Image (cartoon, rainbow, N blue to C red):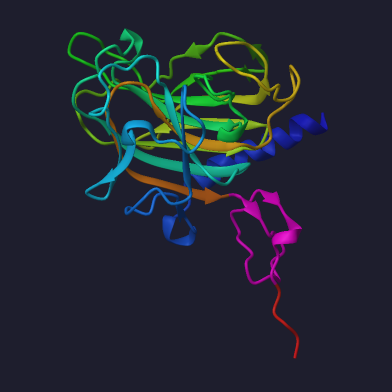
Amino acid sequence: MLKKITFLLLFFYARVLCAQHPTNEHWEPLFNGKDLQNWTPKITGYPAGDNFGNTFRVENGLLVVRYDAYDAFENRFGHLFFNKPYSYYRLRIEYRFTGQQVLGGPSWAFRNSGVMIHGQTPESMGLHQDFPVSIEVQFLGSTPEEQRPTCNLCTPGTHVKMEGKLFTPHCVNSKSVPLQGDQWVTAEVVVLGDSLIQHFVNGAEVIRYEAPQLGGGNVNGQQLSWGKEGELIKSGTLSLQSESHPVEFRKVELLNLEGCMDPSAKNYRSYYVHSKPTDCIYSVKE
């Protein structure tokens, strides 16, 4: 009963947070618009930190994924990891697909990218590992011939619960409206530790689930065991995908929901939902 009450309270907080006025919130830009400072690439077949072919780069103030140095894709799936893990937060990303898929990219990866949350570190991945153990917020683009929703859920090496039941399929579509062409899309994810996770597209909720946990397959080349089957995932890395189609990101920002919840502290924030007393900063007494 206590666990259910806690979940309902967190769900209420998530609904309130998405309605708050942005001027009261302290968003942290994870991408500075200039370089890849604080980001680490990991591309299949290469060690962490090796940005093969300059796959991830900054052009005209945008963080972009490019394949002009590739003769063919050859299953070189890539991920660009932010160097700090998070647990309770809102993540907001503005992205768009551009150009043509690189030669040899799998058909399912056409206009396909995403952001991985609650993931392992790039250093813990195997040299030939294709995807980090994580929860994937999958970005898909549509064509006139194929209408596809975006901000879907995929689960490499993980499971979740939906409506209270363990959900084990690898991917499930959101209820978003299919988006055409190269238009910019605003994706937002609300993550509340090992409880509730919600995806939003252009401000509208499109999917929700809870209890992210380890389990399942769909990860090749993993060398190190990362936790035990069924273990809840409370925090982890964020990473942007490279799956063979060019994509651009013009904003990657995060609102941390974990911190000092003591109103007498200098860094108290009314929108925090998870207390971290060690973060509290108090005025020095004279």
Q: Quadrant of the C terminus?
A: bottom right
Residue nearer the viewer, 62 or 195? 62
Residue nearer the viewer, 170 or 260? 170
Residue nearer the viewer, 102 or 234? 102
- Residue at 54% across, 23% down: 127
Residue 153, percent across and down? 49, 20
Quarter-wise, where is residue 107 in the image?
top left
> Is 79 placed left or right of 170 in the picture?
left
Q: Where 203 falls versus 106 (above or below)? A: below
Whether residue 145 can be seen here: yes
Whether residue 162 can be seen here: no
Q: Quadrant of the N terminus?
A: top right
Q: Return the residue found at the far right.
A: 1
Residue 258, percent across and down? 64, 50
Q: Where 199 falls versus 35 (above or below)? A: above
Quarter-wise, where is residue 83 in the image?
top right
The range drawn in magenta is: 257-281
Residue 179, percent across and down? 26, 24
